[in-house]
Structure formats: C-alpha cells, structure tokens
Amino acid sequence: TLPGCSNVAEGAPLDAIEASILAAITEDPRHADELVEATGQPGHRVQAALLTLTLRAVVVEGPAGFYRQASRP
C-alpha cells in the first residue's frame, strides 16, 4: 500500500466527503464542478475523493470530467 492510501483498500468505509460525493451522483453522470457545488467542498478535496472512489471502483470517470456510479454485479 502506498503511504496515505490505506483508505483505498477494498471494503474500507467511505469518509464524509466520499459519501457526500456518492450521494450527489444520481442516475445521470455529473461533472466534477457540479460535485464541488453539490458538496460544498473545495475542488482539490473533491478531486482527491473522486480519484479514491475511482480506484476503489465505486465510481467510473467518463469523458470530459463526468463521473457516474459504478455498476454493481
């Protein structure tokens, strides 16, 4: 595990920012800027949380900075 990336481990609980981002992503993909507005968090924190969520396969990044929830089996 990389330093500072322990929360990327499979099954780790979401932190508050990750949970608020996931709650803000509904059926339609949302742009990262929309997620900044929806969560009230600074852009750099939202981007970091989106990266973590992407690495954990919770969200999927689409074209032009849009994100959607990953499909569950």
Image (spheres, grey):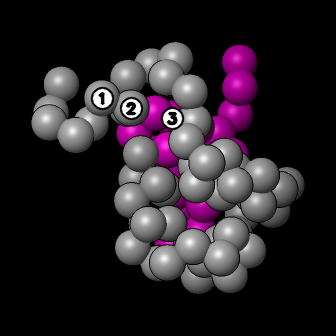
Q: Position of residue 66 (x, y in %)?
A: 59, 69
Image quarter in which the C terminus is found = top right
Q: Which residue is mark 3?
A: 57
**Which span of residues is magenta-colored?**
53-73
| Residue 6 circle label | 1
User: Is residue 68 among the parts visible in the rendering?
Assistant: no
Q: Position of residue 34 (x, y in %)?
A: 67, 79
Q: Residues within 10 Å of mark 3 (few under 14, many from 20)?
A: some
Q: Residue furthest left?
A: 3
Observer-side mark, 3 or 1, equals: 1
Q: Position of residue 10 (x, y in %)?
A: 45, 19
Kind of residue at badge 2: Asn
Q: Do the residues bearing badges 1 and 2 touch, measured as CB atoms within 8 Å? A: yes
Kind of residue at badge 3: Ala
How far is mark 2 from mark 3, CA to CA? 13 Å
Q: Residue at x 39, y 39 (%)?
A: 55
Q: Is residue 34 above or below residue 25?
A: below
Q: Which residue is mark 2?
A: 7
Residue 10 as seen in the image, left or right of residue 15: left
Q: Is 65 part of what is drawn in magenta?
A: yes
Q: Nearer the viewer, residue 15 or 33?
A: 15
Q: Residues within 10 Å of mark 2 (few under 14, many from 20)?
A: some
Q: Is 64 part of what is drawn in magenta?
A: yes
Image quarter in which the N terminus is found = top left
Kind of residue at badge 1: Ser
Q: Secondary structure at mark 3?
A: loop
How far is mark 1 from mark 2, CA to CA? 4 Å
Q: Earlier in the sequence, mark 3 or mark 1?
A: 1
